[in-house]
Image (tube, grey):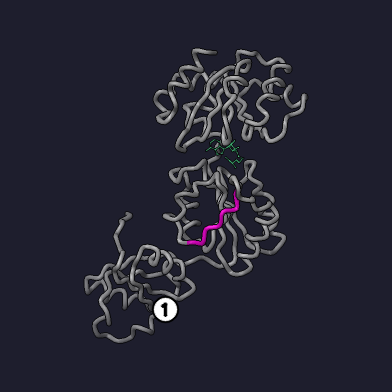
């Protein structure tokens, strides 16, 4: 069971060793509580009433024996006692997949890792706007945005490793899944090379979830039994276009807006029908989510004003999505959708 209690301005006694309690202290501080601390059970050996009756006791599970009598005494006195997780071992890195950009699609493991972090290095594709409510960690933006020089990949790796060697619980929060065009493997390698313990929390990849936000299933019985996820960061080779067109399954392209022209021409040249349905879904799960439906032969003009981040879907599953879309895509610009359908 989870309860929310307003602790703003309330006295909260946090029990547990300084090291184990440091994140709980930050969380309660951030919530506006007036904090007092007890770091060893011996600090409360007297049997009399508690010095100042707190509103709440937040008991951090620090592994020290001897807390129970004190906590029991609080409960007997009608003071609620919450049990708080201890801060994890320090000096490690967790690569966390943040999903396509909404906190709703974070995993339970991601929420836990964020809560326990001392510092979070995040990208702009991750659900960064919600971070202050999910963690009291220091937040560092290492992503690209206009007028802001992005931190280079080696710079990010250096920052992560240095923070972990400095004894911090580091979370590297990335959009989608860390291992899908996310350079997650390189970041793990950098930690391993520096002797820093590292683990990976998988995330919901945009390759599947963003089409789903537009009602498009990447596979569908009797329509498509495979899907291929491709990076459109650089144009594909002629051979790659041939292979893709020959597979006959769904093609999902990430980072594909800049090379859409080459992709459409390449697939046409490789023999794919100009009538093959295509969808461009921009800003999945975010304000301004928009779906553009066209066909291979018309997509370049239909999607002329589309911008990143966007996922492209090529395949008959786009038609399946059309039937379902009214249902699944609450925030789509339906006028535009209708216009593009009629126009194609
Ligand atoms: N690791 C990420 C992908 C990183 S590459 C993942 O698994 O999702 C970045 C590309 O992902 C963007 O150019 C875009 O193609 C896609 N993308 C990520 N989030 C998106 C979103 N909310 N809406 C549309 N496309 C998104």
Q: Quadrant of residue 89?
A: bottom right
Residue identified by numbered label 1: 39
Given residues 38 and 247, the one toward you in this image is: 38
Image quarter of the C terminus: top right
Q: Residue at x 24, y 82 (%)?
A: 49
- Residue 110 on the magenta segment: no
Q: Is residue 199 above or below residue 182?
A: below
Left or right: residue 290 versus residue 276 is: left
Q: Which residues are magenta?
A: 137-143
- Vertical order, 142 against 239 (above or below): below
Left or right of 100, for residue 258:
right
Residue 140 magenta: yes
Please identify the quarter of the rendering in which residue 73 is found: bottom left
The percent coordinates of residue 209 (x first, y second) are: 51, 35
Q: Is disc 1 placed on a helix, strand or loop?
A: loop
Residue 335 placement, left or right of 192: left
Name the side, left or right, on which 308 lies relative to 79.
Answer: right
Q: How many marks?
A: 1
The residue shown at (65%, 53%) is 151
Label 1 C-beta lies within 8 Å of the nearest ligand 1 atom:
no
> Quarter holding the N terminus?
bottom left
Residue 150 in percent (x, y) is at 64, 50
Q: In the picture shown, does residue 6 fall above or below 208?
A: below
Q: Name above or below for residue 343 compared with residue 10.
A: above
- Residue drawn at the location 59% of the way across and 24% of the way down: 304
Quadrant of ligand 1 in image? top right
Give me the residue at 54% from left, 18% from top.
222
Front position in the image: 86 or 257: 257
């Amino acid at each position: 069971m989870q309860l929310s209690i307003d602790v703003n301005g309330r006295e909260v006694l946090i029990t547990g060793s300084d090291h184990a309690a440091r994140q709980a202290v930050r969380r309660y501080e951030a919530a506006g509580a007036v904090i007092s601390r007890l770091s060893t059970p011996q600090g409360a050996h007297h049997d009399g009433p508690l010095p100042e009756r707190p509103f709440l006791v937040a008991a951090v599970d620090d592994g020290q024996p001897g807390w129970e009598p004190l906590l029991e005494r609080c409960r007997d006195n009608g003071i609620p006692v919450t049990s708080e997780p201890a801060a994890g071992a320090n000096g490690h890195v967790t690569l966390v997949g943040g999903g396509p950009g909404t906190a709703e699609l974070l995993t339970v493991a991601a929420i836990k890792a964020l809560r326990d972090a001392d510092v979070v290095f995040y990208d702009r594709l991750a659900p960064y706007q919600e971070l202050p409510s999910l963690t009291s960690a220091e937040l560092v933006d290492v992503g690209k945005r206009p007028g802001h020089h992005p931190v280079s990949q080696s710079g990010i790796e250096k920052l992560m490793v240095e923070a972990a060697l400095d004894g911090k619980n580091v979370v590297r929060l990335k959009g989608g899944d860390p291992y899908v065009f996310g350079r997650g493997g390189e970041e793990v390698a950098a930690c391993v090379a520096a002797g820093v313990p590292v683990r990976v929390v998988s995330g919901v990849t945009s390759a599947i979830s963003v089409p789903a936000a537009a009602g498009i299933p990447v596979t569908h019985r009797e329509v498509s039994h495979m899907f291929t996820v491709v990076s459109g960061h650089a144009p594909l080779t002629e051979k790659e276009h041939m292979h893709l067109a020959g597979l006959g399954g769904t093609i999902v392209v990430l980072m594909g807006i800049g090379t859409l022209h080459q992709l459409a021409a390449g697939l046409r040249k490789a023999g794919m029908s100009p009538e093959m349905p295509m969808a461009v879904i921009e800003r999945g799960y975010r304000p301004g989510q928009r779906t553009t439906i066209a066909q291979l032969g018309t997509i370049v003009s239909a999607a002329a004003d589309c911008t990143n981040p966007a996922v492209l879907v090529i395949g008959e599953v786009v038609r399946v999505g059309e039937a379902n879309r009214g249902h699944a895509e609450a925030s789509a610009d339906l006028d535009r959708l209708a216009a593009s359908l009629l126009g194609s």
